[in-house]
Structure formats: structure tokens, C-alpha cells
Image: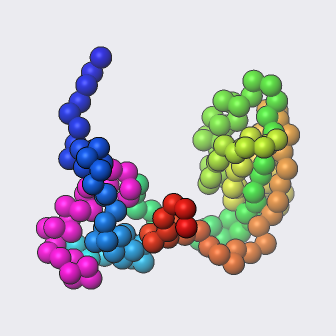
């Protein structure tokens, strides 16, 4: 069995120190507004030195609070104007096959394992409604699908509110 020494972040969490103090919440809020902020600009906004801010951001990354930085591309701008949510109710023994197929299907931008009668929720982007049929046909051999086209998105995808706390 391999054991590793706990990191400073893990040690802080084990000692009951909150990783999400007020300064880190301000850092996360600023990065939520603009993930491309330089360390010096981020430091200016939170009232700290750039090295101190870099250390805090690094600790938030190591702890998994910051999971990554992503590019947000408009699917319609690259020829994929049709988006749909697809629910899948797998047949017996088909769960792992559906997850694997979703990972290998480039039209699938999201795949979630969900509760209820359906076990998967996929977000699919295609060039036309007819193209959705081809994607659905790949999944139909593993279970039943139900699709809903996305007409508009009045609330676009966004990160959770940094100020939100459990129980509020």
C-alpha cells in the first residue's frame, strides 16, 4: 500500500481551517468575472501582493476548488446551431456502454448520471435536426431516448455563486 504525506491544503482542511475564507472568496469572485486576470491585477483587486495571490490560487487549484479554466465557444458560431437535452433509460446491463459511448461521441458536450427512471442526461450539439437522428440511433441500441430541443437559454451556464453556502 502506498501512502502519501498530506499536502498543506489537506492538512489545513483536516485541522479545520477553512479554505474559503473571505479573501479566497473574493479571489474566486474576481476569477469568475474574468478568469484571464493576471496575478498582479487579481492581487490589486483583492488588496494583496501578487505572490500571495498566486499561492492562494495554487492552493485552491490543488484542493480542487478551482477545477480548471475553460474556453466558452458558441456552438452556433462553429456550425452547430441545434442543441438538445437527451435523456436515456438504459436496457439491462447497458449503463457502462452508454457512458463509454457518450465519452466517444463528439456531439455530446455533457453527460450526467441522474436519478429517476432515466439514468443519463446528455447535452448534444448538432448541425441540423436531421443530424440528431444519427446521434440518437447510436444510443438506441443501449436503451430508450427522449429528446428536448433547447429553444433559448435565458440563464446561460455559469459557475455556482461564490457567496452561496450550504443551508442558505
The quarter of the rendered structure image containing the C terminus is bottom right
Q: Disc count in the image?
A: 0
Query: Which of the pair 109/91 is nearer the observer?
Result: 91
As for residue 53 lying within the magenta part, the answer is yes
Q: Is residue 66 visible?
A: yes
The answer to which quarter of the image holds residue 148 is: bottom right
Image position of 58 (left or right of 141): left
The answer to which quarter of the image holds residue 103 is: top right
Q: Indicate the position of residue 25 as horizontal and vertical percent values.
A: 35, 70
Q: Compared to 144, does 32 lie above or below?
A: below
Image position of 108 (left or right of 18): right
Query: Which of the pair 15/164 is nearer the observer?
Result: 15
Q: Residue at x 45, y 62 (%)?
A: 70
Q: Indicate the position of residue 118 as horizontal and vertical percent values.
A: 79, 43
The residue segment tinted magenta is 43-66
Q: Is residue 40 visible?
A: no
Q: Main secondary structure of the magenta part?
A: helix
> Which of the colour schemes (rainbow, by chain, secondary structure, one colour) is used?
rainbow
Image position of 43 (left or right of 130): left
Q: Indicate the position of residue 10 as horizontal and vertical percent values.
A: 28, 44
Q: Indicate the position of residue 63 as horizontal and vertical percent values.
A: 33, 50
Amino acid at each position: 500500500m502506498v501512502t502519501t504525506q498530506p499536502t498543506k491544503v489537506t492538512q489545513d482542511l483536516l485541522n479545520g481551517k477553512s479554505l474559503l475564507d473571505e479573501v479566497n472568496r473574493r479571489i474566486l469572485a474576481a476569477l469568475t468575472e474574468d478568469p484571464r486576470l493576471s496575478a498582479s491585477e487579481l492581487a490589486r483587486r483583492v488588496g494583496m501582493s501578487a505572490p500571495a495571490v498566486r499561492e492562494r490560487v495554487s492552493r485552491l487549484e490543488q484542493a480542487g476548488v478551482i477545477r480548471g479554466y475553460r474556453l466558452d465557444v458558441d456552438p452556433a458560431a462553429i456550425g452547430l446551431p441545434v442543441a438538445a437535452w437527451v435523456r436515456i433509460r438504459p436496457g439491462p446491463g447497458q449503463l457502462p456502454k452508454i457512458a463509454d459511448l457518450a465519452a466517444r461521441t463528439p456531439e455530446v458536450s455533457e453527460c450526467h448520471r441522474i436519478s429517476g427512471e432515466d439514468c443519463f442526461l446528455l447535452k448534444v450539439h448538432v448541425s441540423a435536426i436531421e443530424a440528431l437522428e444519427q446521434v440518437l440511433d447510436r444510443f438506441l441500441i443501449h436503451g430508450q431516448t427522449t429528446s428536448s430541443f433547447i429553444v433559448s437559454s435565458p440563464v446561460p451556464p455559469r459557475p455556482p455563486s461564490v457567496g452561496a453556502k450550504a443551508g442558505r
